[in-house]
Amino acid sequence: MALTEGKKAPAFTAVDQDGQTIKLADFKGKKLALYFYPKDATSTCTVQACNLRDGFKELSKKGIEVVGVSPDDEKSHLKFIAKQALPFRLIADTDKALCEKFGVWAEKSMYGKKYMGVLRTTFLIDENGVLVKIIDKPKVKEHASEIAAAFGL
């Protein structure tokens, strides 16, 4: 089931880096940038996370919450957050349930080898839980401004 802009985002309940429950309902009345990335501490994922870190204050001023999701566990997320001084929460989607719910767990290919992995994608969800924009293959070096622009801010 492919997600569509203008439709409700799928409800979810997951666990963040601190083992705290995080739900879509927690963001009612707020804008949410839910970004899916393949792996903590890899080069492209680090560039993306640091760009969001650097733009975090500006996004927050505009009322946008940022939450990252990858299949890494809480321990990996805690190290990634500490090393890169990330000011936002990371969901530990170790069973890939959230990735599958949002349609980003898919077959990928590298050097002719096929494997399953996370498609780098960001879902922008408005105050009412509606998907306002799906950013496929976000520009990792300018992702914060890409999010702000997509929200029309």
Image (cartoon, rainbow, N blue to C red):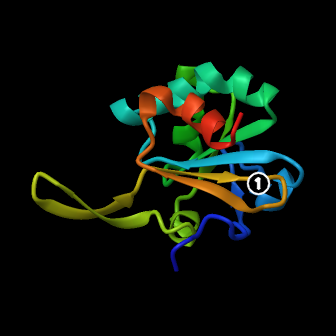
For the point 36% across and 59% down, which residue is it? 117
The image position of residue 7, as x and y in percent, is 69, 70
**Is residue 65 shown left or right of residue 70?**
right
Residue 79 seen in the figure = no
Q: In the image as oriented, which residue stretches furthest toward the front?
A: 152
Residue 42 vertical placement versus 103 (above, below): above
The image position of residue 126, as x and y in percent, is 77, 53
Q: Nearer the viewer, residue 121 or 93?
A: 121
The image position of residue 36, as x and y in percent, is 52, 50
For the point 71% across and 66% down, which residue is it? 12
The image position of residue 46, as x and y in percent, is 44, 30
Q: Identify which amino acid the numbered label 1 is placed on.
A: Ile
For the point 69% across and 66% down, which residue is it? 9
- Residue at image mark 1: 22
User: Which quadrant holds residue 63?
Assistant: top right
Q: Secondary structure at mark 1?
A: strand
- Indicate the quadrant containing the C terminus: top left, top right, bottom left or bottom right: top right
Residue 123 vertical placement versus 1 (above, below): above
Residue 150 vertical placement versus 22 (above, below): above
Residue 142 vertical placement versus 103 (above, below): above
**Is residue 8 shown left or right of residue 53?**
right
For the point 72% across and 49% down, which residue is it? 19
Q: In the image as oriented, which residue stretches furthest toward the left?
A: 112
Q: Nearer the viewer, residue 90 or 59?
A: 59
